[in-house]
Amino acid sequence: MKQCSLNNFIASLGPWLDNNYIRSVSIDHKGHVTLFFMDGIRDTYDITDCDRSQVLKVCKDLSRSGIPVKEG
C-alpha cells in the first residue's frame, strides 16, 4: 500500500486517465483506494491527509469520467 497526500494522489492519476488505463476503482471502509488497471495490475493507496468523505468526492469525479467506482 502506498501512502500519499490527496494532492499527490490526484496528480498521479493524470497520466493513467489520459491513456484510459484505469479499469475500475474500489474504496474500502477505511477510505483506502485501490486502482485496477487494464493490464491486471492494481495499486492501493492510503491517502493520509483527508477523511473517507473527501476521498469519495475524488472518486465520484472518476466515476463521472466513466470509470466504475465501487464502495466497500
Image (cartoon, rainbow, N blue to C red):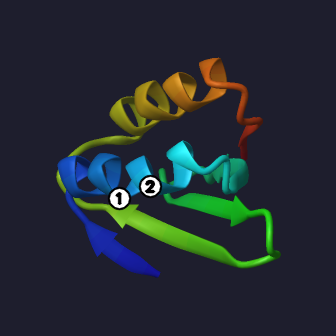
Q: Please give the residue where the numbered disc 2 appears in the rendered image.
A: 15
Taking the spot 72% from the left edge, 63% from the top edge, the residue there is: 36
Crowd tier of the residue under label 2, counting other residues whose Cα lies within 10 Å: few below 14, some 14–19, many 20 or above: few
Q: Which mark is residue 4?
A: none
Q: Residue at x 31, y 41 (%)?
A: 51
**How far from the left and from the top, in percent, is residue 10?**
32, 46
Which-is-in-front pick, marks 1 and 2?
A: 2
- Residue 21, by quadrant, is bottom right
Give how far across and how far down residue 46 sits, in percent: 39, 66
Would residue 2 appear left or right of 26 to someone viewing this image? Answer: left
Residue 38 left/right relative to 48? right
Residue 65, percent across and down? 62, 24
Nearer to me, 22 or 46: 22
Which residue is rendered at x = 39% and y = 78% of the image? 2
Task: Report if the CB atoms under discs 1 and 2 are less than 8 Å apart.
Answer: yes
Determine whether 57 is above or below 1 in the image. Answer: above
Classify mark 1: helix, strand or loop: helix
Amino acid residing under circle 2: Pro
Which quadrant of the view contains residue 39?
bottom right
Q: Nearer the viewer, residue 38 or 46?
A: 38
- Outermost residue, top side: 64
Q: Amino acid at mark 1?
A: Ser
Residue drawn at (60%, 51%) of the image: 19
> Which residue is tagged 1?
12
What secondary structure is found at the residue carrying circle 2?
helix
| Badge count | 2
Label 1 crowd (10 A; few <14 / some 14-19 / many >=20): few
Q: Report the side of 48 relative to 1 (left or right).
A: left
- Please state the horizontal and vertical placement of residue 6, each as a whole percent of the image: 25, 48
In screen coordinates, is 61 left or right of 53?
right
Placement of 33 over or under 59, stated as above or below: below
Residue nearest the viewer, comparing 11 with 18: 18
